[in-house]
Image (tube, rainbow, N blue to C red):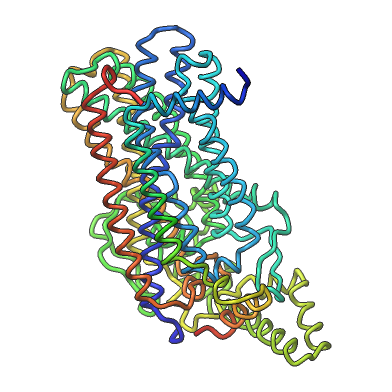
Amino acid sequence: MSILNRIFNFYLNGFKEMKVGKQLWLIILIKLFIMFAILKLFFFPNFLKSNFDSDQERSDYVIEQLTNPK
Amino acid sequence: MENFDFTLIDWSRGQFALTALYHWLFVPLTLGITFILAIMETIYYKTGDLEWKKITKFWMTLFGINFAIGVATGIILEFQFGTNWSNYSWFVGDIFGAPLAIEGIMAFFMESTFIAIMFFGWDKVSKGFHLAATWLTAIGSSLSALWILVANGWMQNPIGMQFNPDTARNEMANFWDILFSPTAVNKFLHTIYSSYIVAAVFVVGISAWFLIKNRNVILAKRSIIVASAFGLLFTIMTGFMGDESAREISKTQPMKFAAMEGLYYGTTNAPLVAVGILKDDPTVENPKKQDFLVEIQIPSALSYMASLDFDAYVPGIYDLVHGNEEQGIMSYYEKIERGTIANNALADYKLAKKENNIVLADSLRTNFENEEWMNSYFKYFGYSYFKNPHDIIPSVPISFYSFHIMVALGGYFGVLFLLILFLSLKNKLHTKRWLLWVALWTMPLAYLATESGWVITELGRQPWVIQDLMPTMTAVSNIDSTSVMITFWLFFVVFAALLIAEIKIMLKQIKIGPNEGGH
């Protein structure tokens, strides 16, 4: 059996034989879904990336904020 | 100050604090229990005693639960950097980028390989290979904490960078200066050692419960010996590193140091308040000595803590605000003037560039390349946002109590570990039921101590997000405060649900015990 097959089977059997681990993986998957599919997508856009097109514009904006805060 | 939206700032701070404090409920146990597991498995490896294997597997299951619930909660902090703290993220960009990228790569490789071998590899890989994976998980966990603590150390003591006035970013000038900054090194060691204490208290507490219930007695007795010896060692080490940290804080963040002790007037032979209850919070406008309802002092100990010299002068809050010529302390008034010169230079440079005034722009730019000018003016850049120096003082009660709670609990843990270890080695611990109950109820105190450590680190630094360079109020993004409020409560609900899930699963596994449980 190739090394890749052995590694694959190692993980596969490990997941199959889990007891409390199955419940924990479910929680991890739900958590990751909430974080990336809901929070990141709808609530946490990157402010500078989504409002400005270039690094120059971002720099100008931040300098404006630092020297003339509003 | 009047230009800032404090509703937005307060909710952004509250949201970040909620996330960081929640994330920090899981990290210390992960950092510490992996080493306890490695020690237990090493004993199994050396002796071949299957009871030690059972013990290791039981604690490994509890580690797995804690790890699963806590994993990735830190990523939410990175979401917040980009959304709520965009000015800050841009300003620190290059400094944070490298350490956080290294942390992400390390964590990925560690979690996908060594932890998998730990959980899936029993009886499938050799005993030695499995043991190596357990040790590498322990070492890797602590090393992955290094990078975020290096980044935090830079926020406390920004060094090793060059500010670029064209981009408004701090660029890394010397990676090694940042990595081996005394602040970062002390912070890393103090944080991981104190995390090991949390794990030791956790193992001792649950084992004590088994002894109270007269269940899994061999597991409980053996676990207590390993965990209390481990806890005692790292309580001592944490104390040493805390002492080093305090000395560093007295140099780089003297206001935080003064606030931690409620010291308003500087003095030589400054006493350390070992135990104290503040009576009121004097102001610098109406200065008076800090009054205490209860106060137990150790003479000259604060001077020694700050400078390893009992006669050394320790500046108080009043001295730092008003300056002290005799002691060579620059006043906050002077720092505000210097910071304003730096801020105006940046504004003038930007205007000169916009108006295509190349001669003026070049002349102003040379300031930002001149080390002496940077140390004389830009070093105080953040002070330019304040008119009243009293706004640059952190909350004295929060700083004082969080520091003293952390230190007092650290001392208590040391005494408890010593007593428990002594009685365990005499095989008398199981007869002292009162002590077993004390050990059990010490578990929440370990979390209180470690969270207090973060409170003094972060709130004691206020109003700065980056010491002297960027106040918290200028770090926030110009976004709608309502969206921050909504996500605050959203996090609150999600975090509460996850915490309840963890506690329920953890309690179920503890009740099941090592015989029928499993990963």
Percent coordinates x, y for residue A63 in the rendering: 62, 79
Residue at the extreme right of the image, as rendered: B359
In the rendered view, tell whether residue B437 sits above or below residue A2.
below
User: B496 or B25, which lies in front?
Assistant: B496
Percent coordinates x, y for residue B62 in the rendering: 34, 31
Determine whether, in the image, residue B517 is placed left or right of residue B315.
Answer: left
Quadrant containing the C terminus of chain B in the rendered view: top left
Determine whether, in the image, residue B65 is placed left or right of residue B32.
Answer: left
Percent coordinates x, y for residue A21 in the rendering: 36, 32
Q: Residue at x 21, y 27 (%)?
A: B511
Q: Residue at x 79, y 77 (%)?
A: B366
In the rendered view, tell whether residue B48 sits above or below residue B325.
above
Q: Residue at x 21, y 32 (%)?
A: B438
Q: Residue at x 33, y 33 (%)?
A: B201
Percent coordinates x, y for residue B266 in the rendering: 46, 64
Quadrant containing the N terminus of chain B in the rendered view: bottom left
